[in-house]
Amino acid sequence: MNIIKLGTEVVVSDPCYTIPTWCQVIVKNVLPGNYHSFLKKTDEGDWGIRNSVLLVIHEDHMDTKKKWYHHGGTVGVDSGQAGIFSSESYRNDEIAEQIGEGEYGAFPLMRDESGDIWYEKMCSRTLGESGWGHYPEGVVSRSGIGDGSYQLRVARHKGKIVGLAIDYLMENRLNLNFYKEEVFS
C-alpha cells in the first residue's frame, strides 16, 4: 500500500527545486498523519497513457467524497516530475540512504548542492515504467505532459487540509470530486 506520513507543513514541488522557489507551494495547516497516495492515468490518444493526477488523502478521511478546491499556488515543473513531500524530508540528504532506490534503480547525478542525493532518489522513482513512487514521507510522479505549471487542489475538513492533489491539467473539471475506488490505482 502506498502510505506516506505528512506533518503540518508540506512541500508540493518539482523535487529539483531548493527552498524557496517561486513555483513551489509550501502548504500549512495540514492534518498530520498517514496519507494514502494514488495516481490517476488517462489515455491521451497519440500521447499515450499519461499521469493526470497525483493525490494523497488522510487515512481518517478515505471513506467520504471530497470537494476539491483550487489552492491558488503554482506547482512549476522543470525536471518532468512533481510530488507531495513532508517538509522535514524535502531535499534532505541525511535520509536519502534510508529511502533506497526506486523502480528505475540508481540514478547518479552531479552533486552540486545540498539535496541532490535525495533528488536522485526521486528520479529513480519517476523514471521507472510506472512513472511514480513513494518513500515514507513523500510521493512523486512524472508530470503528465512534461514541464510547465500545474494546479494544486486541496480538500479540507474542519479547517484542516486532509487531501492534496496535483492536477496535471488533463481532467478538464473545476471541481474534482475524487473517490479512491472510482478513479485511482
Image (spheres, rainbow, N blue to C red):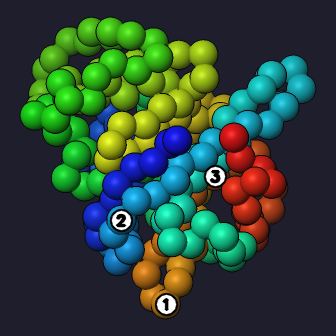
Give the amino acid at mark 2. Answer: Gly
- Of tags 1 and 3, the one toward the viewer is 1
Q: Earlier in the sequence, mark 1 or mark 3?
A: 1
Residue 52 in view in this figure: no
Circle 1 SS class? loop
Query: Where is 147 relative to 4, above or below?
Result: above
Q: Amino acid at mark 3?
A: Asp
Q: Which residue is mark 1?
A: 158
Residue at the disc numbered 3: 167
Image quarter of residue 135: top left
Numbered label attached to residue 33: 2
Left or right relative to 50: residue 122: left
Q: CA distance from mark 1 to mark 2?
A: 16 Å
Residue 169 is situated, as x and y percent measured from the top left of the image, at 70, 48
Q: Which callout, 3 or 2, points at the residue further toward the start of the chain?
A: 2
Find residue 89 and name its label. Answer: none
Q: Which amino acid, by three-letter code, is at mark 1?
A: Lys
Whether residue 47 sits left or right of residue 91 in the image: it is: right
Residue mark closest to the camera, 1 vs 2: 2
